[in-house]
Image (cartoon, helix red, strand yellow):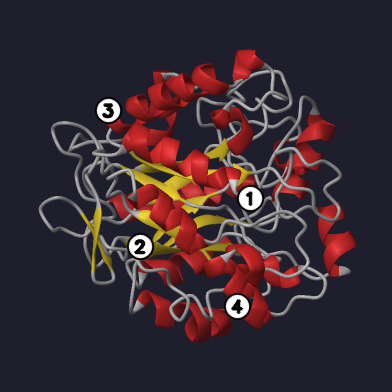
Amino acid sequence: MNPHAADTGGRAAAWRARRGGAALAAAVLGGAGLASAAVTAAAPSGPRPAAAASALGAPQLHVSGNRLVNARGARVILHGVDRSGTEYACVQGWGIFDGPSNQASITAMKRWHVNAVRVPLNEACWNGEPYVNPSFAGATYRAAIKAYVRLLNSSGMDVILDLHWTDGRFGGCSSWHAVCQKPMPDMHAVRFWKSVAHAFKGNGAVIFDLFNEPFPAQVPGSSETQGWRCWRNGGSACTGISYRVAGMQTLVGAVRSTGARNVIMLGGLSWSNDLTQWLAHKPTDPDHNLVASWHSYNFNACSTRSCWDSQIAPVLKRVPVIAGEIGENDCAAGYIKPLMSWLDARSASYLAWTWDDWSGACASGPALITAYNGNPTAYGAGYRAHLRSLAGGPRVGTGGAAGP
């Protein structure tokens, strides 16, 4: 999802834009439901929720069959949070992070037994495009992200870097600039991912989430079949998108061209909620290190156990699935509780949207906290209680230190 602007109204607008955008969805989809994040969890009766962090920091990850494993081959299950802000503050011209990015704020996450953080990025800010305030773009932005990743890794947390907002004019998003969620990445994403991959290659504790929430099938004149072709191939395979699209195969190739062997996440269609043809359109990866990204919210099309059983479970049997975003729009936990139990039973990873203190609690979107010391909203309390119930031993991601 995408969060905020400089004030509460801006946050709400960003949340809508990020979701695919309420305004954009209305204009493009005629009221069709948005797709969002649903994540998987580790079964308490199976392996521990996450492998213990190595002496050097967070687990170094790779794919083995349908499991995410560490350097020793032991299964790793990620239970984390999304940390929104770095996708919008820079392009809105007032900062890089929304809220603190220091050790105290990370320690608060660890008290929840969080072992992974997903950091949404802005293409224009990372690439240093001239329309972004240089105080928050280019080398300054990249240095801030690298420092935050180092701090998270040194605290035993794996990091997912997500390309969230990109250039390209489309539908209800009035600007060509990277100020909202687009249906697919533009060709500037190739430069972005080559740069990100070069910066983090050799660090297996960083996962690359190539594009937040694709929705090419929802573009007027497109279809499910055309959408999946566009998703994989980009370019002329895309219908109804005015800018040149970088498909997932192109972006996988961009990452691998740098020598980076990091795990790569790929979200499906319908705002990453649809994985029905993910296996059939899976890009070629010489390193065989691809993971399916799924987003699941209570307002998505695939939001029932029967849908999870029929559409998501078959993918889980073949490749790892990370639910990069899960949540609900009622500031409660009635949706995520059965979802997490379903994911736990399948040893899947998940992250909840979002670890941000937005004024009005959940008024600007699903917010887990009311303060960066970890004080939860009602929704956050449900997520925290579930993670604590799974811990049952050493604190997740701390290398074995006992937790509260």
- Residue matched to label 2: 290
- How far is disc 3 from disc 1 in space, using C-alphas? 33 Å
Q: Is residue 30 above or below residue 62?
A: below
Nearer to us in this view, 387 or 163: 163
Residue 372 position within the rendered picture, expressed as x and y whole percent measured from the top left: 54, 26
Nearer to us in this view, 163 or 53: 163
- Residue matched to label 4: 304
Q: Is residue 143 above or below residue 8?
A: above
Three-letter amino acid code at disc 4? Thr
- How far is disc 2 from disc 1 in space, using C-alphas? 21 Å
- Residue matched to label 3: 154
Residue lying at the far top of the rendered structure:
135
> At 16% across and 31% down in the image, what residue appears?
56
Of callouts 2 and 1, which one flags the residue occurring earlier in the amino acid sequence? 1
Q: Is residue 303 above or below residue 374?
A: below
Residue 100 makes an appearance in the image:
no
Of callouts 3 and 1, which one flags the residue occurring earlier in the amino acid sequence? 3
- How far is disc 4 from disc 1 in space, using C-alphas? 33 Å
Q: Is residue 357 left or right of residue 312?
A: right
Nearer to us in this view, 58 or 193: 193
| Nearer the camera: disc 2 or disc 1 | 1
- How far is disc 2 from disc 3 in space, using C-alphas? 24 Å
Q: Is residue 224 left or right of residue 196?
A: right
- Residue 94: image quadrant is top right
Nearer to us in this view, 72 or 351: 72
- How far is disc 2 from disc 4 in space, using C-alphas? 26 Å
